[in-house]
Image (cartoon, rainbow, N blue to C red):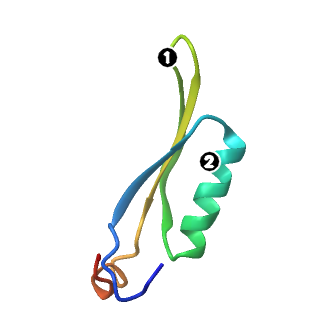
Amino acid sequence: MDHTTERLRYILLTAPNGDDLAARVSEALDEGYELYGSPAITFDGERMLVAQAVVLPAYAAGRYRRP
């Protein structure tokens, strides 16, 4: 990610399985996000969906500008 862009302070990452979610969360953590709350899982009758919220630490949120 270009560090001259503003990033969202809160993101809800979702994926169809735990492995895909783990990869997305790991990438967000590498970019400076922190976990927010517990992961969630749901089933809509046809497929599973897992989710995890991540947030930028308060000190970093204002340093970036979105393209």
Q: Which of pointers 1 and 2 lies earlier in the amino acid sequence? A: 2
The amino acid type of the residue labelled 2 equals Leu
Q: Which residue is found at the position 56% from the left and 13% from the top?
A: 46
- SS state under label 1: loop
**Residue 30 percent location from the top left of the image:** 60, 74
Category of crowding for the residue at label 1, using alpha-carbon neighbours closer than 10 angstroms: few (below 14), some (14–19), many (at least 20) = few
- SS state under label 2: helix
**Residue 58 percent location from the top left of the image:** 33, 77
Quarter residue 49 falls in: top right
User: Of residues 52 and 17, which is closer to you in this image?
Assistant: 17
The amino acid type of the residue labelled 1 equals Asp
Question: CB atoms at circles 1 and 2 under 8 Å apart?
Answer: no
- The span from disc 1 to disc 2 (Cα, nearest Å) is 17 Å
Q: Is residue 63 above or below residue 14?
A: below
Q: Is residue 42 above or below residue 28?
A: above
Q: Which residue is found at the position 33% from the left and 67% from the top?
A: 9
The dot on residue 44 is 1
Q: Which residue is found at the position 53% from the left and 10% from the top?
A: 45
**Residue 2 percent location from the top left of the image:** 44, 84
> Which residue bears the numbered disc 2?
21
The dot on residue 59 is none
Quarter residue 56 falls in: bottom left
